[in-house]
Amino acid sequence: MVRLPEPTPVPPNVHINGTSSHSEEDENASKERFSVPALQLQIQDLKHPGATRFLNAVNATDSLTTGTLNLLKLLYRKPSDAETTVPPTSSVTLILENFPGVAYTVGSGADNNVKEIHFSLPYIAQINPSRIAEEIDGVITHELVHCFQYNGHGAAPGGLIEGIADWVRLHCNLSPPHWKQEVTENWDAGYQHTAYFLEFLEQRFGRGTVRRINEKLRGSKYHERDFWMELFGQEVEELFTEYTQSLQ
């Protein structure tokens, strides 16, 4: 059985203030720079309104670099730590193209370490002008997490994978205004719903909790009961009930 950290008091609602820095240890870790893989940008249609809006709103190099460094600091130990286990992602290509939806990420290569983030030009074209840079950076940060996170050897629930990505986005102060904490039927409803549940666990069990979840997804195939019991000594449904009660 894994020894659990002493729990911290749980506030009635989760509030995110600032970024991922919680302590002097985090500040020291942030001074160490992670390696950033090769970054590329492809725009399939420069005449599309979404392409113009993207190029006017953000610097692609800055968005990809900052997003990568932020997620690595949140999900992994500092670079000098011998236990740091960042995946060997060798390159990330951001592709702006015409398709319905928002964005998705795919991998290729012998070790699945060549990543492509596909971002919808029509979606970019309709973003509210008052927050276009924040939304672009938020989507890119979410998709970058998929380039560097673990997935329980392919067995983890999609809702957990998406929740971790949105938890990182939440901690980077890039959550859109429509996000809110609300009671959902399932803990793995995904995206911001699971992100707020993960933040509850981060506050309940201490800094680095989501990092430990990601690390356990690296080390073994996901089996729900064993996964949560070994990490927290409780089944996930019990933890989710505590979270739900904290919202009421």
Image: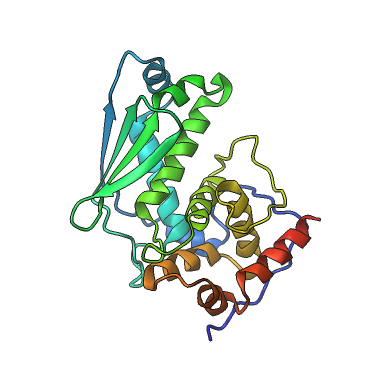
Decide: is 40 above or below 51.
below
Residue 245 in percent (x, y) is at 78, 61
* Res 24 quadrant in image: bottom right
214 sits left or right of 79 in the view: right
Image vertical order of residue 199 relative to residue 47, above or below:
below
Please tell me how many numbered marks the rendered image carries. 0
| Position of the C terminus by quadrant | bottom right
Residue at 46% from the left image edge and 44% from the top image edge: 142
Residue placed most toward the observer, 45 or 27: 45
Q: In the rendered view, how is the structure colored?
A: rainbow
**Considering only vertical position in the picture, is 143 above or below 187?**
above
Which residue lies at the image location 40% right of the left edge and 61% below the top edge?
151
Residue 113 position, x and y percent, is 25, 53
Q: Residue furthest left?
A: 110
In this view, 131 is above or below 210: above
Front-most of residues 196 and 83: 196
From the viewer's perspective, is 170 left or right of 114? right
Q: Quadrant of the rendered structure where residue 21 is?
A: bottom right
Q: Where residue 193 appears, x then y in whole percent? A: 62, 50
**From this viewpoint, which residue is outermost toward the bottom?**
1
Residue 237 appears left or right of 147: right
Give the image location of residue 87, x and y in percent.
31, 60
x 28%, y 23%: residue: 44
Asked whether the viewer can see residue 66, the reply is yes
Residue 155 occupies quadrant: bottom left
Q: Which residue: 33% across, 61% down?
A: 86
Instruction: For residue 11, say whether it is visible.
Output: no
